[in-house]
Image (cartoon, rainbow, N blue to C red):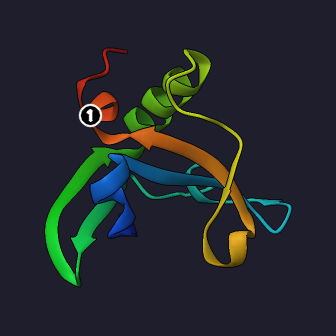
């Protein structure tokens, strides 16, 4: 299982950040070998929820959300803005039909 944490900002924006490239190297959702993808949603240091999806389904949903113009890509993010990824609306991720 690949585990990522979204801290605070998701509560305001409704988005999670999904990384694809870090320092010009493929990473994150593209390269993981994990069977499951988990996003821990924290606010003020407290866990408010966890989203867990099969990695294969997460890839399909995120790809479709980008293709349909719902998830902006590429977006700089991560520590020191050294990664590129997509801003994925949580509501759309959880309700999106593939």
- What percent of the width, then of the height, locates residue 82? 75, 70
- What percent of the width, then of the height, locates residue 70? 50, 24
**Residue 30 seen anywhere in this rendered image of the structure:** no
Q: Does 37 appear above or below 68?
A: below
Q: Looking at the image, which residue is at 38% across and 63% down?
A: 9
Q: Does 69 appear above or below 39?
A: above
User: Looking at the rendering, which quadrant does residue 8 occupy?
Assistant: bottom left
User: Looking at the rendering, which quadrant does residue 63 occupy?
Assistant: top right
Q: Does 72 appear above or below 81?
A: above
Q: Residue furthest front?
A: 12
| Other-residue count near label 1 (Cα within 10 Å), few / some / many at <14 / 14–19 / ≥20 | few
Q: Looking at the image, which residue is at 45% across and 40% down?
A: 88
Q: Nearer the viewer, residue 49 or 2?
A: 49
Task: Give the residue at mark 1.
Answer: 91
- What percent of the width, then of the height, locates residue 69? 57, 20
- What percent of the width, then of the height, locates residue 29? 55, 51
Q: Nearer the viewer, residue 72 or 63?
A: 72
Quadrant the N terminus occupies: bottom left
Q: Nearer the viewer, residue 53 or 51?
A: 51
- Would residue 21 appear left or right of 98 to someone viewing this image? right
């Amino acid at each position: 299982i690949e585990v990522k944490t979204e801290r605070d900002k998701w509560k305001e924006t409704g988005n999670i950040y999904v990384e694809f490239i870090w320092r010009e190297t493929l990473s994150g959702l593209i390269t993981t070998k994990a069977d499951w993808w988990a996003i821990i949603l924290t606010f003020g240091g407290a866990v408010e929820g966890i989203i867990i999806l099969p990695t294969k389904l997460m890839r399909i949903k995120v790809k479709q959300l980008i293709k349909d113009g719902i998830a902006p890509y590429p977006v700089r993010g991560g520590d020191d803005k050294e990664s590129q990824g997509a801003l994925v609306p949580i509501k759309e991720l959880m309700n999106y039909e593939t």
